[in-house]
Every structure is written in structure tokens, then in C-alpha cells.
Image (cartoon, rainbow, N blue to C red):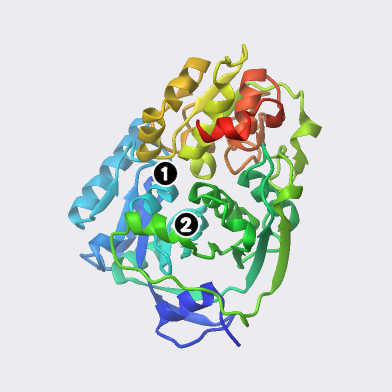
Amino acid sequence: MGMTITEKILARAAGLDAVTPGQFLDCKVDQVASMDLQGKLVFNTIGTLGSDQLFDPARVAFTLDHQSPAQTVAIADVHAAIRKAAKKYEVKNLFDVGSGIMHVVMPERGLVLPGELVVMNESHTPTGGAMGAVVIGVGQTDAAVAAALGEIWLVVPATIRINLRGALRHGVTTKDVALHLMKLLGYERKAIYKTIEIGGPGVAALSMDARFTITNYCSDMGAKSAIFEPDEVTLEYAAARAQREFTPLYSDPDCRYEDLIDVDLGALEPLLACPHALDNIHSVASQAGQAINEAFIGTCTNGRFEDLAAAAAIVSGRKVAPGVRFVVVPASREVYQRALGAGHIATLSEAGALVFPPGCGPCMGEHSGVLGAGEVAISSGNRNMKGRMGSPDSFVYLGSPQTVAASAVCGVITDPRTLAPAPQELAHA
């Protein structure tokens, strides 16, 4: 019996010829990362282990992204403690305030590569699996052990295979694919501690930005990891950024999947996750007309260059509706600089958007546009449980950047197909 990509990567990391689902492994990691919410605790835990050094300072990274820039003195003190500890342990990659979100920055900087095992101290870690890597989220203790020793214990997950076929229609995006998969698999139900492997003929037309959106959503389906089959798109992206050598791996034709799901991309329409559950999925058309107070584009789900470009194409020549706050937070400095150079930041600003420094923004309800009681937001983010973006009495709808942008200028939830530019116009955006 052959092995899946994930099984092959874990077997290599464990120094074994083969592994099977359910098997316990002691694996060597290729990269470790943590962020501001947990980084100080990770460093403290490393200290309690009695370690005075990291297994490889070039393979341990920290980002200051969730509470960035610091909005309180207490958080500023946490950031200062992380900077001090990073200097003490000679961390080579400290991505400070304004660098961007860990799940966007790490692949951009060539620190998540095909065939690798990467552990990160954050819940949306499976995002990096779009690189053809096994990227797993862990708690502070496991992250500290991995950073100090370069090892982690894991159980080999079973794999659910998603076959994408066909092509997305105008106005439909991979955010809608992710929402469709959430509807099929549910919020932390059918995919708990599974790997979601994505492939099929429909993948070839998807950019890396588009792929990251799908893998990002898999964590809230309960998945341990998510992974795309590496192809020419993956390898070109990786080769341009890699800080070390890498070897892509592929599933064997006779590997075993726990489940196979076929998705016809051409049959999908713009979707929303409605309050207050990620799997409360409905069509945008069915919710059209719902008044909003805030529209937010950003996060590790949809704050990338193509997301800002698509939003700018929709709002170009239009203005944000009266009474609506249109918040835009680029997911990284690279994204911001590219969007600035392409004129998208200017277009968004001219329409009335508030453009914030790269980072997580209001996604977790701490700064840069949180919601008050009774307010309604439409967000390109990934979570909409009560209180996620501010008041527990607020309401959050989740949709694509195109849906968010269309809603921002109309003042109500709007199907982006009614405003979206034609494909040939978007190609020149």
C-alpha cells in the first residue's frame, strides 16, 4: 500500500520507510514559529526546560502580528520581552510590528517549503500547507520543545482527499470554495485530526494566493493539517523564495484515503458564513440587502495581493456607502508594497477605505475597527463566533473580498457579480 503526501513527509521526518494513520511518531521538524500572543510564553517554557539555546536559530521564527502595533502598555511590554528573548537566543527571523501575519510572512520569506514538516504556535497554521508541506499548529509547550530540541511527537492523521475539477465562474473565488467545504465537512466535525489533501485538475488554474485561502479554512474544519499537491505553480513560488533546499513529495497512486470528495468549481456561487457559526453557510444572494456597519478586508485568509487587487477593481470609481466603515489591512508588508506600487491602495483609499498597517487587524476583536453592540460587519476573515470582532452583541458575516468590497460601496450585503468587473478588466487591475 502506498502513502499519501502527508504520510511520506512524516515518515521522512521520523526517519522511517513507511507510516500508517494512527501511528505515534517522534519527528524532526524543519521549521518552528510562534507569535506575539504566545511568543513570550514559548520563550519562558524554553527557559524552564533548562535549554540555553535553540536547535537552530535560523529555523525558529517569531512574528508580532495579532496585537500589532501594540494598543496597550501591557502588550507593548510583551513585545519588548519577545524582542529581548529573540536577541538572547539569536533568533534569525523576528518579524516585528508591521511585517505581517505569520501565515503569510513565513511562506513569503521561504520558511515553509514543499516536503517539509513545520510547526507553528497558532490555530490557522494549516494555511502553509498550500506549499505542499505538512504545517501543524501546536500549543506553547510543544512549540517550546520543538524550538529547543528540533523534535515533536505526532500521531499520523488519516487523509480526506478533495478533488477539484472545472473552473470558477466570474465573481466566484476560492473563499467560496472554502465556505463550500466548510458546509460539507462542518465546523470541527468530520475532519477532526485529519489531513485534508487538495488536488485534481481544477487546481492548475489556482494561484498561490487562492490556494492559501482554502488551506487556511481547513483548521476550523478540525483538520490537523491541510496540503495541496505541489505543482509548477507551487515550485515556482517556492524556488523564488527558498532559504534552503527542499524536496517535494507526492501521493502514491495506491495510497489510502479515508474519504474522497469531488467538487465541481463551476457549480459554485458566492457564499457567506452567517452569524454566529462558521458552518452556517448560505448564498450571498439569499442574504442580499442586509445592512452593514463595517466591511473588513484582510487576515491570513484574504489579505493577500490578489484580494486587495480584486477589491480595488470593484470599488474603483465608486465610494464607500455613508455610515459604513471600510477597513483594509494588508496581510504583510510585501502585500502592502505590491498593492501600493500597483495603485490598489490609492484606489481603495480614494473610495473611502481606512488602510491600516500590515497585521491581523480587527479579526480577533482587539483593535483597528472592533464592533459595538448591535453592529453588523462583513469580513473576509475566518471566524464569526459571538464576540469575535468586538461586542458579543455584534454580528459577523464572512465572505470573499469581492463580496466585502461590493457590500462596502452599497451599504448592504451585495452579490459581487452585480458589481464585479469583467474578467478582462480584472486581468489588468
Q: Earlier in the sequence, mark 2 or mark 1?
A: 1
Could you say whether the residue bearing mark 2 is in a helix, strand or loop? helix
Q: Residue 73 occupies which quadrant of the picture? A: top left
Q: Nearer the viewer, residue 197 or 103?
A: 197
Q: Is residue 182 left or right of residue 46?
A: right
Could you say whether the residue bearing mark 1 is in a helix, strand or loop? loop
Q: Which mark is residue 233?
A: 2
Q: Residue 175 occupies which quadrant of the picture? A: top right
**Which residue is depicted at the point 74% across and 51% down?**
183
Q: Is residue 3 left or right of residue 40?
A: right
**Which residue is depicted at the point 33% across and 54% down?**
241
Vertical position of residue 245 compared to residue 397: above or below: below
Q: Which residue is mark 1?
A: 101
Kindly identify the amino acid type of the residue bearing the numbered disc 1: Ile
Q: Position of residue 228 (x, y in %)?
A: 54, 62
Let me know if residue 131 appears in the view. no
> Badge 2 local density, few (<14 within 10 Å), some, or many (20+)?
some
Kindly identify the amino acid type of the residue bearing the numbered disc 2: Val
Give the CA distance from mark 2 to mark 1. 22 Å
